Image: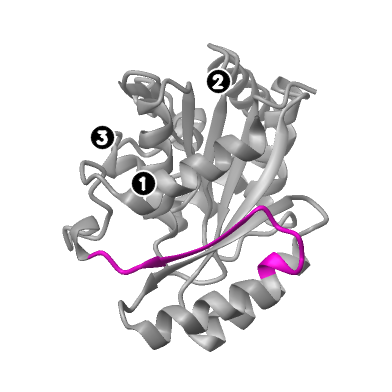
Amino acid sequence: MDINSVRVEILGVKGGVGKTTIAVHLSKDLATQGKRVLFIDKDFNGWGSSALGVTSRGLLWWIANGGPKDFVREVRRNLTVLRLYPTSPEFYDLMLRIHKKTELMSEGGKVYKEILTSEEFDYCIVDNPVNTSSEDEGTKHEIQFFFMAKPRERLVGLFVSDPSSAGLRATWEYLKGNRSWVDPIGIVVNMIPPLPDEVERVRRWLKENCVREGLRICEGLEFDDRLYDYRNFANPEIEWEGSRKLVKLLNEMVN
């Protein structure tokens, strides 16, 4: 297996934990380092692809309706962005339409393969909807078509949580429940209040759970309000030390 070719699922059991922010900044910082990155936006709100400059209704919408292929674009050197899905109400209607026509499924798979094999990407960073599982309709089909195009890809999962006790427990159970389809490489506890007691509490939790489990990335990141422009999605132009730390760990794991 070519271990330099990795699909990283960014996963969260609930919204508002900074999952998309981490996915966007990881993609940007890996590309800045010279890695060839495909950012795959599977989240129905599309904030990640919008933040990076792709505001299309997605590949799924194009499959059913045609038009310009504005769902994929190289937005900066080494970084290509692909938006897969429209918003939630449209997604479910489109899935029903496409399921009824095998030719549409085949056409979508063909176009997806063309994108995935258009160059040798080092990383595919996937921003998932909240609480994604392998049984979700969109996930099942997307992963099937993905591995038809890239059968040697390594599939790993990076789980993102907020620092609340309830959030940490839920994230840990979510990670354990998804081992059947994704290899967990770590947990990022994001948006920690910059208070010594809170930072230490999260550090202990990561040591007692993530580190003890043998996961490679066990990081706590303090809240940084520079990352958010409060228009619903992350600001990718901010230089974020937290993302650079994760990039370093990710590269070490792969290499």
Q: Is residue 81 above or below residue 45?
A: above
Q: Position of residue 202 (x, y in %)?
A: 51, 78
Q: Earlier in the sequence, mark 3 or mark 2?
A: 3
Q: Which residue is mark 2?
A: 121
Mark 1 crowd level (few <14, some 14–19, many ≥20, 10 Å Cα): many
User: What's drawn in magenta, residue-wise?
Assistant: 210-224
Q: Nearer the viewer, mark 1 or mark 2?
A: 2
User: Which type of secondary structure does the marked residue at label 1 adopt?
Assistant: helix
Give the spatial CA distance, label 3 vs label 2.
Answer: 20 Å
Q: Is residue 220 above or below residue 147?
A: below
Q: Is residue 217 above or below residue 3?
A: below
Give the spatial CA distance, label 1 vs label 2.
Answer: 19 Å
Residue 217 falls within the magenta-colored stretch:
yes
Mark 3 crowd level (few <14, some 14–19, many ≥20, 10 Å Cα): some
Q: Is residue 58 visible?
A: yes
* Amino acid type of the residue tagged 3 in the rendering: Gly
Mark 2 crowd level (few <14, some 14–19, many ≥20, 10 Å Cα): some
Give the spatial CA distance, label 3 vs label 1.
Answer: 9 Å
